[in-house]
Image (cartoon, rainbow, N blue to C red):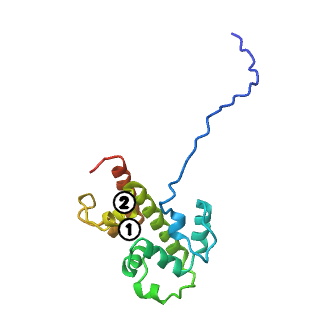
Amino acid sequence: MSYKSKTDSKIELNEPMAAYAIQGNSPSIYNLLGSSKLPKLSNDFDVLTLARQGFPKRVLLSLAKKISLNIQELANILHISERTLQRYDDDDIIKTEYAEKAVELARLYTRGEEVFGSIDKFKIWIKTPGLVFRGEAPLALLDTSAGFDMVFKELGRIEYGIFA
């Protein structure tokens, strides 16, 4: 049995370019975290850099206002006491772990808006207790990463019409 030597041939795959569009009227994670005194956030690496460096308390409060959370709800999600959060000056840089939670919160609200088609509808859903969450509101689960995962998964089910 003889083996023929392989000839080097260049294999190239050509795929058509796909165009992706972002709806202009929906606030993205970049808009939720953006601030006039921060560099413009235009991609995920900008958000990553911002989370690693931490950001001013005013950005955190701006996010809370945009997503209709009060200080107590925000403090519970961040695992910080309400009083400690209030002690920060507006320009003080918050710790990285709080910044990371805030980025995750902005991602969740952006995803919720995509699924529900409106940030207002998502704000109502996230504060409404549901059977799938054993009678708790999805917002109450956001104090852990497992809770964030559960809410993200439920949004995926809702998006595809799988109500559990």
**Residue 134 image position (x, y, % from top left):** 24, 62
User: Which disc, if any, is residue 64?
Assistant: none
Against 23, residue 143 (above or below) is below
Q: Secondary structure at mark 1?
A: loop
Q: Circle 1 is placed at which residue position?
A: 142
Q: Nearer the viewer, residue 160 or 83?
A: 160
- Left or right of 22: which side holds 5? right
Q: Secondary structure at mark 2?
A: helix
- Image quadrant holding the N terminus, namely top right
Q: Nearer the viewer, residue 29 or 13?
A: 29
**Residue 58 image position (x, y, % from top left):** 52, 81
Residue drawn at (58%, 41%) of the image: 18
Residue drawn at (48%, 90%) of the image: 87
First of labels 1, 2 by sequence position: 1
**Total tally of numbered discs in the picture:** 2
Do the numbered discs 1 and 2 sit on residues whose CB atoms are within 8 Å?
yes
Against 89, residue 8 (above or below) is above
Q: Nearer the viewer, residue 126 or 20?
A: 20
**Residue 19 image position (x, y, % from top left):** 58, 44
Q: Nearer the viewer, residue 150 or 138?
A: 138
- Whole-angstrom CA distance, mark 1 to mark 2, is 8 Å
Q: Residues within 10 Å of mark 2 (few under 14, many from 20)?
A: many
The three-letter amino acid code for the residue at tag 2 is: Val
Against 33, residue 4 (above or below) is above
Residue drawn at (43%, 76%) of the image: 65
**Residue 76 image position (x, y, % from top left):** 38, 76
Against 134, residue 74 (above or below) is below
Q: Circle 2 is placed at which residue position?
A: 151
- Left or right of 131: which side holds 81? right
Residue 39: quadrant of the picture: bottom right
The three-letter amino acid code for the residue at tag 1 is: Leu
